[in-house]
Amino acid sequence: MIKLLAPVWGIILLIGILPVQAQEKISFFEEHIDFELDSAYFSINGIYSFFNPTDREINQRIVFPVAVEMNQVDSVNIINLSDMHRMQFQRLKSAFTFFINMPPRDTVDVNIFYRQKTAEKNTYIITSTQAWKQPLKKAVYTLITSLPADEKNFAYPFVSKEVINDKTLYRWEETNFMPDKEFDVVLENTLFF
């Protein structure tokens, strides 16, 4: 009986190891994210760039954490910009997952949009980049808001600020960026809640 089970356990272990090995080969190297904050929603609209340096096609599961429970997130839309198809996703408690098909030695850009209700503290999780074990080569973030943001509570210094009509546009740019804090937007005036 033990001799019969050994090959079965070997196959199960091999299957369990393959996705981990594949994830280590794909790199997440760049992101461009536009945040919008108004009295109703904190919206996230980003382009995330992945690279497959191998000579084989890889279908990789991506786990995308969010700062609130998924029942507080709506309008999730994920598009593979390389072939312009909408990607299916699965909701978890505080994350969603999707699969990305990576051609050999190629780059795939994925557009992810979602929104959550505006709160006194609005958080986007960027420390999950650490799971990839390499810094982002480039990260660009913009925030446009009609609400008064508490600038002293920004985790990272912005490079520019511009007032356009009744909204403020902030911009951040980073290279070789390994985030160690989340991207938080704290509101100065909590009369909205």
Image (spheres, rainbow, N blue to C red):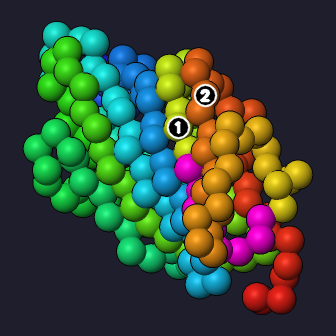
User: Which residue is drawn at the image coordinates 71% and 41% (left, top)?
Assistant: 158
Q: Is residue 23 left or right of residue 86?
A: right
Q: Which residues are magenta?
A: 142-149
Q: Is residue 175 above or below residue 117?
A: above
User: Which residue is drawn at the image coordinates 24% and 60% (left, top)?
Assistant: 88
Quarter containing the C terminus: bottom right
**Upstream in the sequence, badge 1 or badge 2?**
1
Q: Position of residue 61 (x, y in %)?
A: 34, 41
Tag shown at residue 140: 1
User: Which residue is drawn at the image coordinates 53% and 37% (left, top)?
Assistant: 140
The answer to which quarter of the image holds residue 82 is top left
Q: Nearer the viewer, residue 91 or 66?
A: 66
- Element type at mark 2: strand
Residue 9 is at least partly visible in this image: no
- Element type at mark 1: strand
Q: Nearer the viewer, residue 23 or 104?
A: 104
Q: Position of residue 33 (x, y in %)?
A: 48, 48
Q: How many marks?
A: 2
User: Which residue is drawn at the image coordinates 46% and 37% (left, top)?
Assistant: 31
Q: Is residue 38 above or below residue 158?
A: below
The answer to which quarter of the image holds residue 53 is top left
Q: Kindly identify the amino acid type of the residue bearing the numbered disc 1.
A: Val
> Disc 1 versus disc 2: distance between alpha carbons?
6 Å
Tag shown at residue 88: none
- Classify mark 1: residues with Cα within 10 Å, few (<14), some (14-19) or many (20+): some
Disc 1 and disc 2 in contact, CB within 8 angstroms: yes
Q: Nearer the viewer, residue 63 or 20?
A: 63
The residue under label 2 is 174
The answer to which quarter of the image holds residue 157 is top right
Quarter containing the N terminus: top left
